[in-house]
Image (spheres, grey):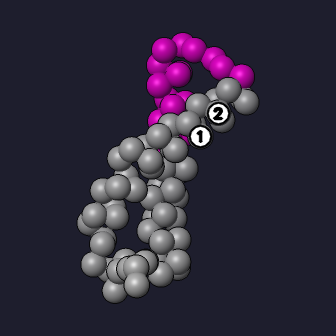
Amino acid sequence: MSVEAVRWKQWLLSWLIVWPLSVSMPWALAAVLELGGLQVPGWLFKAIVAGLISFNMVYWLVPRSNRLMARWLLR
């Protein structure tokens, strides 16, 4: 029998990562672009934000949060 996390726990942990990123990442990117005096089309801005959010989730935040919350996820 394999040990699996309950789906609602996976959802909650993912949401706790996605929500702050989806709020802060567009704001931070807009500030950086403004400081650099750069303007990008809206579709490109959204694509960059989506890419930054997914990159941070896949490579940094989800692996670390899963390790940190493993006992709770698997309980």
According to the picture, the residue beneath numbered tag 2 turns out to be: 47
Q: Is residue 4 above or below residue 36?
A: below
Task: Find out whether the residues at labels 2 and 1 contact each other: C-beta distance under 8 Å.
Answer: yes
Range of the magenta residues? 24-41
Residue 12 visible to an observer of this rendering: no
- Main SS of the magenta part reads helix
The image position of residue 45, as x and y in percent, is 64, 29
Identity of the amino acid at label 1? Ala
Q: Total label count?
A: 2
Q: Which type of secondary structure does the marked residue at label 2 adopt?
A: helix
Residue 60 visible to an observer of this rendering: yes
The image position of residue 59, as x and y in percent, is 39, 44
Which sits in the foreground, 10 or 45?
A: 10
Residue 41: give its label. Answer: none
What quarter of the picture does the N terminus occupy? Answer: bottom left
**Does the magenta-highlighted stretch encompass residue 65?**
no
